[in-house]
Image (cartoon, coloured by chain):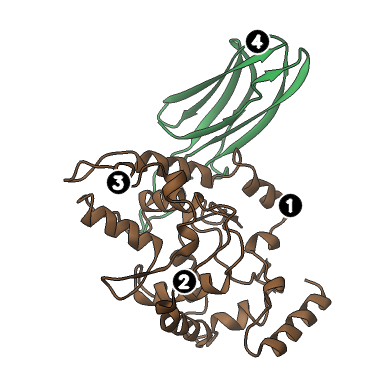
Amino acid sequence: MARTLINVPATAKRGEVVEIKALISHPMETGFRPASDGALIPRDIIRRFACTYNGEEVFSVDLFPAITANPFLTFTTVANESGEIALSWTDDQGKTQTETVTITVE
Amino acid sequence: MTRGRHLAAALALALLGGAAFGAADRLSGFDFLGPQTRAMQQDDMSNPGMLSVLDGEALWNRAGGASGRSCADCHGDAAASMRGVAARYPAFDEAAGRPVTLDRRILQCRESRQRAEPFEWESPDLLALSAYVAHQSRGLPVETGADPRLAPFAESGRELFTRPKGQLDFSCADCHDDNWGRHLGGAVIPQAHPTGYPIYRLEWQSMGSLQRRLRNCMTGVRAEPYAYGSPEHAELELFLMTRARGLPMETPGVRP
């Protein structure tokens, strides 16, 4: 499992716009870079990131080889109800890593 | 940098007779960063170096080697036992009779106490442990060089710093003492105070040690870089940290 840093406010007022920040450690190898022996390092990137709020997708992004290692994404959503925010990263091997955080809406 | 600051630096040079800048004029690499990069370093949720610090914390608590012990088994909670430690490195090593860098000390401890396979120089694991230990000193002033036994080694570090090297025949001081604040290839030349190491460098897209950074500069002037772990690196690092005394530690720093 890759290491992640996620920042979602623990509590929010109903209808408040909350900022979500997500950082994951990943090499994001482009597939165009030669190793010291001249052979290309195989492509290894995160293809897709998605965020669901109580099961409903609120944000998603497709990633491409020009995107930096350890991609940092920040976006906003409207806090309407208490529940679970799930962030998932899917890589070239089709493996998905999901991290969840809970938010309490008053 | 303003003309006024250059003038102030030149005056300080004249007054101190050789020292490039007075204590008040010294700036960390952080002070030369753009606003976005500053924000990135200051917010632990966006600082990619924190991923390495977290890896280091896991390594700190993981038992390993023939001893079956972890760093925490001997040193306890790093927040207490490692507080201020990195701000004193490179430190004098009794057995070796010369200064050792923090990385070298971690490797020594791993080999002799933990009796585990040594990490390779510049490996992600060594950088992570080093970042975790140095992170415990964040905000504390650099104190390196207080030990008088270090003086001759700091002096040879100064000699290495001011000696012209490579095909381009530049010394470190030519850029970092005489031309700091000006631009080289679109980047600002900082004063070379290594307060944020290991750093997350955006150009590398990874963590790196001061030795990697120094080797970069040496390749830049087309000189043969010193090998990782060489005594020259320890002496240069000692001189740079001694020169940075009083500046706050920033690990993990973010640099372009």
Q: Residues within 10 Å of mark 4 (few under 14, many from 20)?
A: some
Residue visible at 58% across and 61% down in the picture: B141
Front tag of 1 and 4: 4
Q: Dot 4 corresponds to which residue?
A: A82
| Disc 1 crowd, CA 10 A, few/some/many (<14, 14-19, 20+) | few
Q: Colour of chain A?
A: green
**Residues tagged by mark 1 and mark 4 found on one chain of the structure:** no
Which residue, given by chain and number where applicable, does mark 1 sit on? Answer: B35
Report whether mark 3 lies on the same chain as mark 4: no
Chain identifier matching the brown colour in the rendered picture: B
**CA separation, marks 2 and 4?**
52 Å
Locate residue B132 relative to residue A82 in the image: left or right.
left
Q: In front: B49, or A38?
A: B49
The numbered mark, 3 or 1, whose residue comes first in the sequence reads 1
Residue pointed to by mark 2: B237
Query: Marks 1 and 2, how far apart in space?
Result: 28 Å
Q: Which residue is mark 3?
A: B74
- Residue A58's disc is none
Q: Amino acid at mark 2?
A: Glu
Do badges 1 and 2 share one subunit?
A: yes
Q: Nearer the viewer, residue B68 or B76?
A: B76
Viewer-closest of B142 and A89: B142
- Residue A22: image quadrant is top right
Q: Secondary structure at mark 3?
A: helix
